[in-house]
Amino acid sequence: MTGDASALENYQRYRAGDESALGDVIRAYADGMTFFTSTLVKNPDDAEEIVSDAFVEIALKKRAFRGESALRTYLYAICRHKAIDLIRKRARRGEIVSPSDDQTADLDTLEGRVLRTERDGAIHRAMTELCEEYRVALYLVYFEDMSHDDVARAMKKSRKQTENVIFRARRALRALLEKEGFTHEEL
C-alpha cells in the first residue's frame, strides 16, 4: 500500500471514530507540509502553526474532504491557502519577515530530514530564487511526487496552465543550476 493510500485509509478510520488514526496521518505528512509551507512564509514557526491549523481543520471538519483529490493534495492546498492569507495579512501590516538564527537552525534540521542528497540541496537552494508560482509547482511535482492533475487542483489552475508553469519553472531552475556549475547531464 502506498503512503498516500495508507494515509487516506488512516483518515477514513479517523472519520469513522478511531481517534488515534489521525496521528498516523499527521506523521505521514507533517514534515513535508511544514517544509513546503516554510518555503512560502519564510518562517518555520509560522509554517508549523499553519500546518497545525490544517490538521485541526481536517479534524474538526471531517466531512469537508470529499475525496475529489488525494488527501495529500487537499492538505497541501489548505496550507498554501493559509500561507497566502498570512502573507497578505503581513503585507497589509507592512511586516517584513526575516527568520531568526534559531528559526533558520530549525529549518536546517527540517531540511536535513526532507532533503537527503547534495543535488536535492542545490535544487532547493536554486528553487528559493524562483518566483512563488514556479517554486510551488516544482516542489509539489518533485519533492511530493504529485501528478500534474493533483498540482493543478492544489494550485487552482487548469492542467494546461499547470503544465506550462512546470515547463517554465524547469527551464528557469535549469538556468539557475547551470550557473551553480551543474551540467545538463547532472540535472
Image (spheres, rainbow, N blue to C red):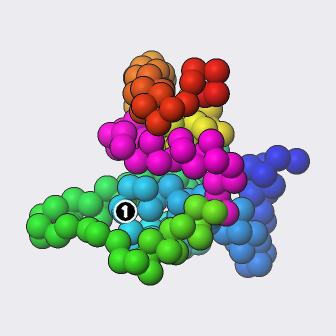
Magenta span: predominant SS is helix
Q: 10 Å neighbourhood of mark 1: few (<14), some, or many (≥20)?
A: many
Measuring from the top left, give residue 105's x and y in whole percent: 50, 74
The residue under the point 16% across, 61% down is 91
Does residue 58 appear in this view?
no
The residue under the point 38% across, 55% down is 40
**Magenta-tinted stretch:** 113-135
Measuring from the top left, give residue 24's x and y in whole percent: 75, 69
Magenta-drawn stretch contains 127: yes
User: Is 142 left, or right, of 90 in this rendering?
Assistant: right
Measuring from the top left, give residue 144's x and y in whole percent: 62, 45
Closer-to-camera residue (21/173): 173
Closer-to-camera residue (41/59): 41
The residue under the point 53% across, 41% down is 123
* Helix, strand or loop under label 1: loop
The residue under the point 82% across, 47% down is 2
Compared to 46, does 79 lie above or below?
above
Toward the right, the furthest residue is 1
Occupied quadrant, residue 28: bottom right
* Figure quadrant of the C terminus: top right
Residue marked by disc 1? 42
Occupied quadrant, residue 183: top right
Compared to 19, does 122 lie above or below?
above
Does residue 108 appear in this view?
yes
- Amino acid type assigned to the residue bearing label 1 in the image: Lys
User: Is 49 left, or right, of 6 in this rendering?
Assistant: left
